[in-house]
Image: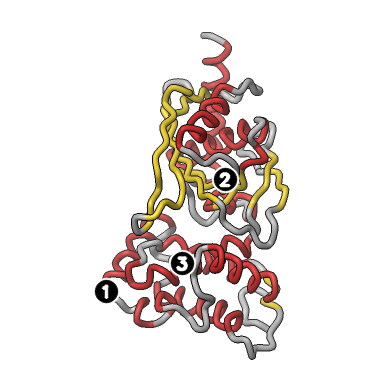
Amino acid sequence: MSKARNIAASVHARLLNLAREREIQFNLILPRYGVERLLYRLSRSEHSSRFVLKGASLFALWSEMPHRSTRDLDLLGFGDSSLAALAATFREICLLDVEDDGLRFDETSVTSQEIKSLDEYVGARVTLMAHLGTARLPLQVDIGIGDAVVPPAEDVTYPTLLDQPAPRLRAYRMETAIAEKLHAMAIHGMQNTRMKDYFDIYYLSRHFNFAREPLSLAIGATFRRRGSSPLAELPLGLTGTFSSDSLKLKQWNAFVKRMVNESTGPSLPEVVEAIAGFIAPILDLNSSVTNWDAPGPWR
């Protein structure tokens, strides 16, 4: 057996043991490993300053046991955002010579396409294939373009699943992540199917402390940059009309069943009410509260 095959087999076995220890399905650990090692290659490349980490992968920074898994990577991109340029960038990243972690990224598999929302261009999607021995890891990278980053992104060391060199890159702070998810709730209303956004804000507000001012600034900057009016009151997506809708309840229950133990997952009305209590005082210009000590309320 070649050295490369030995390393891939060793990594596969160690990931399998880790999945058993953490009581996580192996098919959820494997994509996370692929995302982590792709981030490492990105962080070692000349393109590292062009991207900021966002999305569900952030939760590996904030929690030793992220509350939900993801197979995709979300980034904010700067510079040339053409599809051809992004595809070329990720082909270079696939070919980067780094410490052997058992993975082979196939540069010939890289493709790029537009992401549209309401027929407007909002970013690009890069897909590629990685291999761990005979195992195939399809990866998807969604890249947003030109969003406001308030508060400024922070330099982070991304945690590794195994004892390997860690990615070092810039990443969203919690306030920015919450602001983007709130914006999606505001613009999509009853058409919103992004149950993960509700789950994420609920989780963050239950487990982390916040100061009102930076959260308010992040929300304002995100709405302005995306051409939306500031929120004067809670959006429809944070009302009982949304949380009692039969279709939304069905979508929520399906999401919870996929992501968490369905016997312990919170109900949609519970989650919406909790998020409303978290967001409403930020929107109230007459409110004097300043600090949120998880799980709340504001004081």
* Mark 1 touches mark 2? (CB < 8 Å): no
Q: Which amino acid does label 1 sit on?
A: Ser
**Residue 251 placement (x, y as % from top left):** 32, 64
Within 10 Å of disc 2 (Cα), the crowding (few <14, some 14-19, many 20+) is many
Circle nearer the N terminus (1, 2): 2
Under circle 2, the secondary element is: strand
Query: Is residue 50 left or right of 85 when viewed as pictured?
Result: right
Could you say whether the residue bearing mark 3 is in a helix, strand or loop?
A: helix
Q: Which quarter of the picture shows residue 10?
A: top right
Image coords of residue 253 (percent x, y):
34, 65
Secondary structure under tag 1 reads helix
Q: Which mark is residue 198?
A: 3
Rendering coords of residue 104 (x, y %): 51, 22
Pointer 1 residue: 246
Alpha carbon separation for disc pair 1 and 3: 17 Å
In primary-sequence order, the first of circles 1 and 3 is: 3
Q: Where does label 2 land, which residue? A: 77
Earlier-in-chain disc, 2 versus 3: 2
Q: Residue at x 55, y 15 (%)?
A: 4
Color theme of the render: secondary structure
Position in image of residue 224 (x %, y %): 56, 68
